[in-house]
Image (spheres, rainbow, N blue to C red):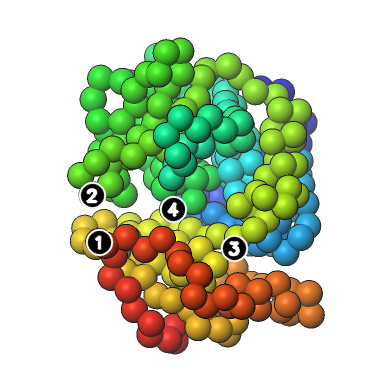
């Protein structure tokens, strides 16, 4: 992948993700940085949801995620993570994936998701810090022989002709996340995909407010007014937020996202609550609560 000439300030990045080790080109460093990255930098699409394009030049990403203490989606999260790992000395290749999560069988979307392939010695690992509520919290070996268990889920890689297919085990069944090949992508490839994701009126990142964050005890996720928590063990719990105040509280207290206070932002947030009867796709294994978020 063609890389941005900008260099990330590693000291400030490590402070931002609360990483205090001496990084080396080994698997332990890879594990630790990824875990801290996804714990600290929330997955979120507030920028595109509020109607602005997302700048994925590395300097702009660093300013937003590190200096402004915001989060971002795949093109921001993985670009920043990849740049950091390259500066440490890892071999990093940017790839692209077709998102298959909760799509109809036979659907073949564009390759609109950014992922990373990182080599440690002779072993290749898949890293992805930007897949919302199913973001990888540990590197996965590029290995199709056996499932791989992480703190937040069990995954497996299989093959579909020339492509790899990543699946996650949910309630005893394998569900497809995305497929990908090993062809390196350029910054230009990502800019085209990013432009669609952050500006097209039918993009889920324009239509819906989304946030996610992984902690050692489980994952928090937000889809519009639906706030959920998936513990490492046990059923998912879901809270239906009742108004803008609860939504702002959730974004700030759970995801550490401070939402601007202006008329256009307030109007956009209000649109989430205009149709309170709209189904949100809650599964039978999820515990639903209408309690107010304090």
* SS assignment at label 1: loop
Please give the name of the residue rendered at 41% of the width and 61% of the height, measured from the top-left corner: 281
Q: Nearer the viewer, mark 4 or mark 2?
A: 2
Indicate which disc, 2 or 1, sits on the residue closer to the N terminus.
Answer: 2
The residue that label 1 is drawn on is 285
The N terminus lies in quadrant:
top right
Q: Nearer the viewer, mark 4 or mark 3?
A: 3
Q: Nearer the viewer, mark 1 or mark 4?
A: 1
Image position, residue 62 (x, y; %): 69, 49
* SS assignment at label 4: helix
The residue that label 3 is drawn on is 209
97 vs 145, left or right, is right
Query: Residue 257 appears in which quarter of the rendering?
Result: bottom right
The residue that label 2 is drawn on is 171
Q: Depth check: 51 or 94 in front?
A: 51
Indicate which disc, 4 or 3, sits on the residue closer to the N terminus.
Answer: 4
* SS assignment at label 3: loop
Q: Is residue 11 visible?
A: no
The residue that label 4 is drawn on is 133
């Amino acid at each position: 992948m063609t890389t941005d000439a900008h260099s990330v300030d590693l000291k400030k990045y490590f402070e931002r993700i609360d990483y205090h080790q001496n990084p080396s080109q080994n698997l332990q460093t890879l594990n630790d940085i990824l875990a801290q990255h996804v714990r600290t930098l929330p997955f979120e699409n507030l920028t595109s949801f509020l109607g602005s394009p997302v700048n994925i030049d590395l300097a702009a990403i660093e300013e937003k995620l590190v200096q402004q203490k915001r989060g971002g989606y795949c093109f921001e999260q993985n670009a920043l993570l990849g740049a950091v790992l390259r500066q440490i000395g890892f071999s990093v290749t940017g790839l692209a994936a077709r998102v298959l999560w909760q799509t109809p069988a036979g659907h073949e979307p564009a390759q609109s998701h950014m992922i990373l392939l990182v080599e440690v010695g002779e072993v290749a690992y898949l890293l992805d810090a930007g897949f919302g509520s199913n973001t990888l919290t540990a590197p996965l070996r590029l290995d199709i022989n056996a499932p791989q268990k992480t703190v937040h889920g069990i995954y497996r890689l299989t093959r579909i002709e020339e492509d790899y297919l990543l699946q996650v085990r949910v309630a005893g069944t394998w569900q497809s996340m995305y497929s990908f090949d090993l062809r390196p992508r350029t910054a230009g490839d990502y800019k085209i995909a990013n432009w669609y994701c952050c500006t097209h009126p039918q993009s889920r990142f324009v239509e819906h407010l989304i946030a996610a964050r992984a902690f050692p005890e489980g994952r928090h996720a937000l889809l519009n007014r639906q706030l959920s928590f998936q513990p490492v063990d046990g059923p998912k719990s879901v809270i239906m937020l009742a108004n803008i105040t609860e939504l702002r509280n959730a974004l700030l207290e759970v995801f550490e996202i401070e939402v601007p206070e202006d008329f256009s932002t307030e109007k956009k947030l209000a649109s989430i609550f205009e149709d309170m009867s709209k189904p949100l796709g809650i599964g039978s294994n999820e515990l639903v609560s209408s309690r107010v978020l304090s």
